[in-house]
Amino acid sequence: MARAVFLVCLLSIVMLVPTSLAQGLGVNWGSMGSHSLPPKNVVQMLKDNGIKKVKLFDAEPDTMDALAGSGMQVMVGIPNEKLEKLADSYKEAQEWVKQNVTNYLRDGGVNIRYVAVGNEPYLTSYNGTYVKTTYPALKNIQKALDEAGSGGKVKATVPFNADVYESSSNKPSDGRFRKDIKNNIVEILRLLNDNRTPFVVNIYPFLSLYQSSDFPKEFAFFEGGSEPVKDNNIEYKNVFDANCDTLISALKKVGFGNMDIIIGEVGWPTDGDINANGKLAKKFYDGLLKKLATEDGTPLRKKKLEVYLFGLFDENQKSIAPGDFERHWGIFRYDGQPKFPMDLSGKGQGNNLLKGVQGVQYLDQQWCVLKSDVRNLSNTQPEVGYACSMSDCTSLGVGRSCDLDQHGNVSYAFNAYFQNKDQDVRACDFNGMANIVKQNASTGDCLFPIQILNAGVRPELSIFAGLFLILMSFFTLM
């Protein structure tokens, strides 16, 4: 009997221990959602899942304060639009470092390891906008870190998109940096090398598939279901390995073949395109995590990889210029709940569902939909256009999670706007064609979301603010 009790207790303890992660695994935590989750709750969720590395795109005080004392390794970010000012003024760089780095390097503070200077600043679609400012900004930030006494621990780097290198033959051994930015890249590489800082690159197998109808679909995954790419004595069975080794070849050609590499972003979206769905995302992550768990690296670099998954949450305010899928990269939904089972260890420890964010506060269980008696749906088109322009309708469409009829499309758009406006009753009118219902409007795989309470906004304060504005309007009219 005593032995049975002991085994039950032991099992309970094991179940409470966070899942061990594949070595070198981290996550990207973006902030381009209209409604944010409480940062402290997010940090606790990361702990619950055993995640110990986080990459940010800024250094927002609320997020940094939440990370303080967590022990997590953090990469803070500097947006591209700040590069020019940091490049032109060393004083600005000093102030940025003081405010966003050294301010947090204290006992019980934030374990900052890297500063990401810009984000994919040499992306071809930017047409050279940040080419001249990236290196001087990087140099100033690293100098400011050194002078602040933090340079030994905190390193400045630049996350690049994989489009900074290419191969004329599509073989990794022919990898080389793009001619138009080669000299600029080499200048940055020298600085990184002098400071023993890794090269950070973002790799997206999904985009290879999205951008070319001729791309072999299975080559985007890790199961070896497509014809391999043969390069000398190496056979590449997936585009991730091929892409990494193309970079290594490019680095070798300019004299930095031994430089450490961090995969700053890699992931698979779950909506917004026919190949963006939960099933394929799970397939991709399962293969990636299994690969990381082996610590075998790539054919040209047989060592453990440091990889940051992209991303943590869906972000409904991201630009959809690259594609509607841009708002659906999260392994968690907008409300911090997991989308599908994931074995973060990569060791086949079952389909452990990720632990979601706890303590999430939702608005009322109500939806805004098209009235059932509306017959002339052509009248709804202007309203739908407006609703979608002011919210997020990227889940709508053939082959997406919300492949609905016309009536369903209109209701989805109306509800998206209504929820984005925090369920303001005035946001559910649409020329008298909409009404609020209490019955869940979701259908099949199509989620009609209920909005979350924006972090830092307490319901009682929102109500008070609303009453205050009404009173102010009344007295103004008097």
Image: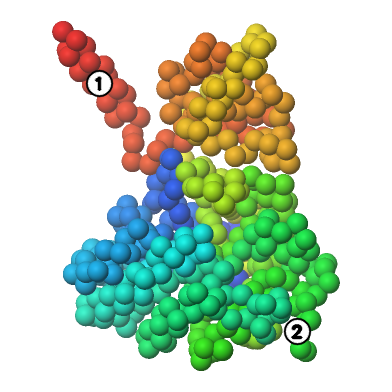
The quadrant in which the N terminus is found is bottom right
Identify the residue at horizontal 51%, vertical 91% (top origin). Answer: 255
Is residue 365 something one can see in this rendering?
no
Q: Quadrant of residue 342?
A: bottom right
Dot 1 crowding, Cα within 10 Å, few <14, some 14–19, many 20+: few
Q: Secondary structure at mark 1?
A: helix
Compared to 175, does 9 lie above or below? Answer: above
Residue farthest along the bottom direction in this orientation: 255
- Report the label total: 2
Task: Indicate the position of residue 385 as horizontal and vertical percent values.
Answer: 55, 28
Q: Secondary structure at mark 2?
A: strand
Report the Cα–Cα distance between label 2 and label 1: 68 Å
- Closer to the eye: label 2 or 1: 2
Relative to the observer, which residue lies in front, 351 or 383?
383
Q: Amino acid at mark 1?
A: Leu
Task: Indicate the position of residue 456 as horizontal and vertical percent values.
Answer: 33, 41
Q: Is residue 131 left or right of residue 303?
A: left
Compared to 202, does 411 lie above or below? Answer: above
The quadrant in which the C terminus is found is top left
Dot 2 crowding, Cα within 10 Å, few <14, some 14–19, many 20+: some
Q: Quadrant of residue 309?
A: bottom right
Q: Amino acid at mark 2?
A: Asp
Identify the residue at horizontal 17%, vertical 12% (top origin). Answer: 475
Task: Indicate the position of residue 60 as horizontal and vertical percent values.
Answer: 33, 55
Residue under pointer 2: 231
